[in-house]
Image (cartoon, helix red, strand yellow):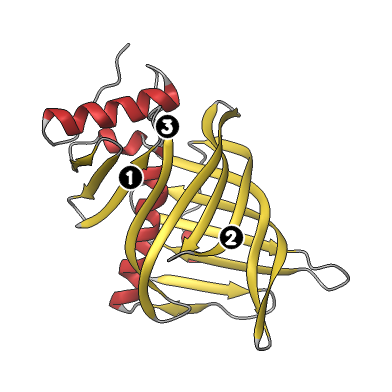
Amino acid sequence: MAVLLLARGDQASRTLLRQAIEARYGHSAPMIETLKIDFKGKMRVKVAFTSTWMPIDAAVCIKFPSAIRWDVTMRPAGLPVNTLSEAFDGESRRRSRVLREATVDTGTESLKSSQARLWSVAVMLLTPLSDPTIQVRRVDDETLEVENTESGIHVNLTLNEDKTLNQITTPCYNPDTEREQVYRLRVSGGQCMIDDLMLPRKIEVLWDDELDMEITPLNVEINPTFAEDFFKI
């Protein structure tokens, strides 16, 4: 069965998008409304006046198209475990650490940043791009500009020669540096089936060209049920 593609755009753009979806899923792309992915990897953590790499366990939970939550557990050698959570429920961004009260941010730049990063994850999965609210424009033989017309957020989706995903980029406010940078999801190692979902083997998160996190997916739950207040931590 051919992929049902309702995204808007000219024929060349839609063809390139279809090739990307079929390179990931074949002719039977999954329908995803909610998703949970468990990861293992490392992230850059500021310590005093420098930064260091910390081993992590992480989970991302998504309710398309409006909510995302990251839970990251850092496991430094010989030190107490530290947990960081960040969530966006469509209206506010919340962050919390173990034994600390959550902070709430409703600033315009911060909310747009959360929306852009949520949309980048959605684009990485490819399947949300078949929706009629999506506008695609072919930039070159390997690059599509993808716009969510409801939020107005644009990202560039770059493919490899075989039409598998290479990276996703978008200009985005970085809440940690308090300036606009390029948010980048870069994948490598090919792709593999994890609990009935085909995913990249390794995902790197960068701000501009600086690597911030490197993660490998371990487990997947497709369309889990989340509590009503889950994205409010």
Which label belongs to residue 164? 3
Q: Which residue position holds label 1?
A: 157
Q: Is residue 42 in sight in this rendering? A: yes
User: Going by the picture, which residue comes out furthest to the top?
Assistant: 1
Q: Which residue position holds label 2?
A: 213
Q: Is residue 230 in sight in this rendering? A: no
Mark 1 belongs to which amino acid? Leu
Q: Quadrant of residue 26?
A: top left
Q: Which residue appears at 68% of the width and 88% of the height?
A: 48
Which label belongs to residue 49? none
Q: CA distance from mark 2 to mark 3?
A: 21 Å
Q: Which residue appears at 23% of the width and 47% of the height?
A: 145
Residue 68 placed where, x, y %? 45, 56
Measured along the vertical axis of the image, is residue 203 above or below residue 49?
above
Measured along the vertical axis of the image, is residue 149 above or below residue 25?
below
Disc 2 residue crowd, few under 14, some 14–19, many 20+, Cα 10 Å:
many
Residue 54 placed where, x, y %? 72, 66
- Callout 2 secondary element: strand
Q: CA distance from mark 1 to mark 3?
A: 10 Å
Residue 63 placed where, x, y %? 42, 48
- Callout 3 secondary element: loop
In this view, the residue in front, 33 or 151, is 151
User: Which is nearer the N-term, disc 2 or disc 3?
Assistant: 3
User: Which is nearer the N-term, disc 2 or disc 1?
Assistant: 1
Query: Nearer the observer, disc 2 or disc 3?
Result: 3
Measured along the vertical axis of the image, is residue 86 above or below residue 64?
below
- Callout 1 secondary element: strand
